[in-house]
């Protein structure tokens, strides 16, 4: 399953869904009904799972777009069953199990009875059962122990369902990080599906020798729109947060926090400009950001500064601002899309 929520992590849900289909990916995962309907509008007929819980008023719209639903309560399953019956359809659902995320999902000890109750409802078919691992990217021993215990507990529950004759056709717990960190556990029986998100776009959350070959899909650049000579001791930007230690040259970039550039990059991160790092100076503004280009020869108005891409990996750029890669990647790419709409 390719996870294409949040407009395919900012990369464009239409294009990514079509590319996933053409590459042989079998299923797609989204967060909202609107995202699922966008996939259908792009002419992609792969099975699509709503990973978030469905709201009652959205069920008919979801079913009419042939979307699969995540459910974690009997009430939600009954609502889906009733709506499907009125439409003359069959609601295909995945039971969501809470493995410690404490966000969505039924507690594991309640999952077995919920599956049995849901399976008895008319106009409804249990297509899958899944869980989400909250610390699959961590290499701390205590987190690894907890993650393995969660996978083992879910595996035991699935074996129990199998013995009772109600094992769902699809069983999945492996997200991008888990596929790298726990491949043997999440890609073998009883599991038969993995959900790839950040890794799909070129950002391994866990490093292994083979991940060195993974390359990011997106490159984000911002143009230099002005150059300023800054005297020693002058303050730059809002709030007097950066003072020139000597005579400096500063470039103004046409990107700011309105475009998804995180404010935390101010005075911490950098861009790649003419093959060299140009550090952000001062606070990130609404529409602009300033970088020090004193040590970079030949910078001109109109030059393209790489915010992230092949020369400045998004993971490196995000870490400079104390962020996870998606906290930089998704807002910045979606901001760039809005800017060019």
Image: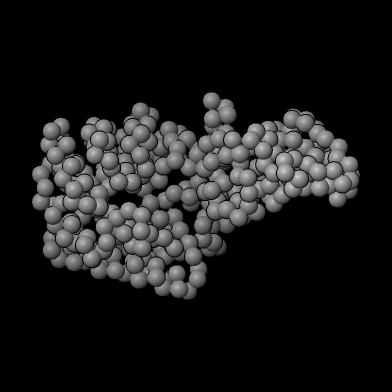
Q: State whether residue 308 is above or below residue 340.
A: below
Residue found farthest to the front: 239
Query: How far across and down, in percent of the image, does residue 188 sit?
Result: 32, 63
Q: How many marks?
A: 0
Q: State whether residue 256 is above or below residue 242.
A: above
Judge by depth and name the residue closer to the eye, 265 or 218: 265
Question: What residue sits 28% from the left and 42% below the top?
Answer: 54
Query: How far across and down, in percent of the image, does residue 185 sit?
Result: 36, 66
Query: How far across and down, in percent of the image, does residue 165 sit?
Result: 13, 60
Q: Specify the color scheme.
A: one colour
> Can residue 274 be spotted in the picture?
no
Please give left or right for residue 230 compared with residue 155 in the image. Answer: right
Please give left or right for residue 112 compared with residue 318 in the image. Answer: left
Quarter residue 248 falls in: top right
Please give left or right for residue 116 compared with residue 73 in the image. Answer: left
Question: What residue sits 14% from the left and 39% below the top?
Answer: 82
Question: What residue sits 69% from the left and 44% below the top?
Answer: 283
Question: What residue sits 18% from the left and 66% below the top?
Answer: 160
Quarter residue 26 falls in: top left
Judge by depth and name the residue closer to the eye, 247 or 96: 247
Query: How far across and down, in percent of the image, does residue 76 sit?
Result: 21, 46
> Can residue 262 be spotted in the picture?
yes
Q: Quadrant of the C terminus?
A: top right
Judge by depth and name the residue closer to the eye, 129 or 186: 129
């Amino acid at each position: 399953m390719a996870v294409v929520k949040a407009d395919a992590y900012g990369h464009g849900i239409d294009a990514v869904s079509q590319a996933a289909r053409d590459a042989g990916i079998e299923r797609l995962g989204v967060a909202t009904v609107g995202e699922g309907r966008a996939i259908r509008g792009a002419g992609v007929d792969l099975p699509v799972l709503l990973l978030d819980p469905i709201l009652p008023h959205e069920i008919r719209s979801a079913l009419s777009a042939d979307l699969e639903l995540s459910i974690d309560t009997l009430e939600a399953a009954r609502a889906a069953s009733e709506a499907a019956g009125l439409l003359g359809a069959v609601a295909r659902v995945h039971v969501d199990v809470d493995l410690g995320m404490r966000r969505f999902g039924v507690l594991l000890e309640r999952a077995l009875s919920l599956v049995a109750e849901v399976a008895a409802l008319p106009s409804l078919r249990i297509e899958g059962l899944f869980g989400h691992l909250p610390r699959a990217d961590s290499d701390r021993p205590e987190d690894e122990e907890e993650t393995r215990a969660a996978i083992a507990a879910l595996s035991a529950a699935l074996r129990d369902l199998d013995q009772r004759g109600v094992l769902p056709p699809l069983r999945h717990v492996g997200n991008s990080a888990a596929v790298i960190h726990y491949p043997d556990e999440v890609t073998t029986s009883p599991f038969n599906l993995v959900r790839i998100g950040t890794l799909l776009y070129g950002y391994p959350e866990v490093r292994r020798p083979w991940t060195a070959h993974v390359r990011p899909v997106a490159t984000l650049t911002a143009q230099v729109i002005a150059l300023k000579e800054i005297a020693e001791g002058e303050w730059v930007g809002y709030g007097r947060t950066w003072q020139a230690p000597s005579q400096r040259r500063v470039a103004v970039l046409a990107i700011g926090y309105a475009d998804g550039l995180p404010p935390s990059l101010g005075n911490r991160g950098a861009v790649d400009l003419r093959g060299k790092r140009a550090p952000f100076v001062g606070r990130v503004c609404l529409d602009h950001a300033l970088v020090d280009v004193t040590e970079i020869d030949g910078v001109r108005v109109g030059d393209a500064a790489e915010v992230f891409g092949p020369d400045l990996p998004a993971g490196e750029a995000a870490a400079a601002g104390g962020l996870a890669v998606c906290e930089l990647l998704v807002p910045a790419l979606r901001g760039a899309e809005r800017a060019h709409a």
